[in-house]
Amino acid sequence: MTVNAGLTIGDKHTHRDFGLYLTNQKIGTPAVQTRYVDVPGRDGSFDLTDVNGGPYYGTRECTWEFATAQRYVDRVDTLCELYNYLHGKVFEFVLDSDPKYTLKGRFFTEDVSDRPQVTTLTVRAQVEPYRSAEDVMLYADAAGGAVFHLPCGRKSVSPTFETRWD
């Protein structure tokens, strides 16, 4: 049985590499970037949110609360290592609870509470609105034509096509 114990940030896992136990997780919803124009002499506003094919989204805020019951000396070392690795930096990350997708954001460590037997810590990230699945490479013999359906969800994408003449 697999336990959803945390997340992999860059190449480090919060539980396996730092000994942190995930106690709470909040994955925010990205806010819609709305655009309204008020015109004098007109009731209401013009909603321009979808003019360029939108809506478009802002960043989402994610927070994770962790706990560790390591010895005090080990806790201090672990927290220093985590701060040096994570604080203020941008990483791609994968949630144990959603392992097929990657997200990307800037991480911040905050709200440390140190009690005699346990330390709790909050990690926050400003995250891009879309999650990504793995890159897909398709090969096809298109001599006579080919049709590809490339599902991408709501995010605008620009696929790359490479051709080869044999």
Image (tube, helix red, strand yellow):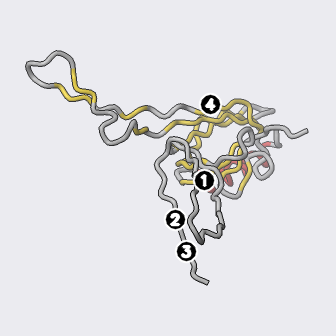
Closer to us: 111 or 1: 1
Of residues 120 and 42, the one drawn nearer to the viewer in this rendering:
42
Amino acid found under the numbered disc labelled 3: Thr
Place of residue 82 in the rendered image (x, y in percent of width and height, measured from the top left): 67, 51
| CA–CA distance in space, label 2 to label 1 | 22 Å
**Is label 2 or label 1 in front?**
2
- Distance, label 3 to label 1, CA atoms, is 30 Å
Residue bearing mark 4? 26
Q: Do the numbered discs 2 and 3 sit on residues whose CB atoms are within 8 Å? A: no
Residue 17 appears left or right of 132: right
Mark 1 element type = strand
SS of the residue under disc 2: loop
Q: Which residue is mark 3?
A: 163
The residue that disc 1 covers is 92
Q: Could you say where residue 86 lies in the image, as x and y percent from the top left?
A: 60, 52
> Tags 4 and 3 in contact by the CB under 8 Å rule?
no
Dot 4 or dot 2, earlier in sequence: 4
- Residue count near mark 1 (Cα–Cα under 10 Å), binned few <14, some 14–19, many ≥20: some
Callout 3: SS: loop
Counting from the top left corner in percent of width and height, residue 23 is at 74, 31
Residue receiving disc 2? 160
